[in-house]
Amino acid sequence: MDKLKFLSGAVFLTFLGSVASAQDIKISDAYARSAGKMAKSGAAFLVIENLSGTEDRLTEVWSDAAKRVQLHTHVKGDDGVMKMRHVEQGFVIPAQGQHALKRGGDHIMFMGLVTPWEDGDVLNVTLHFEKAGDVPVAIPVDQNRNPTEHNH
């Protein structure tokens, strides 16, 4: 019986070792912007680093800064025009890797802004990962940020 308890414990500990936690996710280079004082929408960009040895997936995002917040990407339509699309399945963050949410690509979309965004405002956002769970992030608004600038 002791052998069975030992083996059960070893299997449980092995399982725990393969599960990511919020501490395994590192967020950097975050900023948000909208199209000005009358804008009804805005977007946030950041780099997600997965420090764990297990692939994870960003599946949802929440914020009180807008009525609706979604994960979006840009897709080229049949007419050659780039269009934003909701990515319901989320974004894979590879084990020991990263995924950048950037202008012209994958990003967080805010629709129905509660108040206009101004430089220096801070958006409270919660990123939800399949394995790591909820990761709160404070994202500064930077209306003048050049997409090639990085704040590491």
Image (cartoon, rainbow, N blue to C red):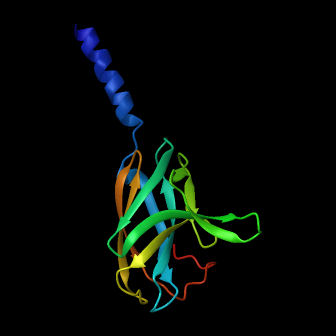
The quadrant in which residue 81 appears is bottom right
**Farthest residue, direction top:** 1
The N terminus: image quadrant: top left
Is 88 above or below relative to 32? Answer: above
Is 23 above or below relative to 109? Answer: above
Is 110 above or below relative to 60? Answer: below
**Farthest residue, direction bottom:** 37
Left or right, 100 with reference to 136: right
Q: Position of residue 99 (x, y in %)?
A: 56, 58
Q: Position of residue 86 (x, y in %)?
A: 53, 61
Task: Give the residue drawn at x 39%, y 55%.
Answer: 128
Task: Give the residue drawn at x 55%, y 56%.
Answer: 98
Judging depth in this view, the residue of 11 and 76 nearest the camera is 76
**Farthest residue, direction front:** 79
Is 98 above or below relative to 68? Answer: above
Task: Give the residue drawn at x 35%, y 81%.
Answer: 114
Q: How many marks?
A: 0
Q: Position of residue 79 (x, y in %)?
A: 77, 68
Q: Position of residue 142 (x, y in %)?
A: 48, 85
Task: Give the residue drawn at x 50%, y 57%.
Answer: 49
Judging depth in this view, the residue of 106 and 113 nearest the camera is 113
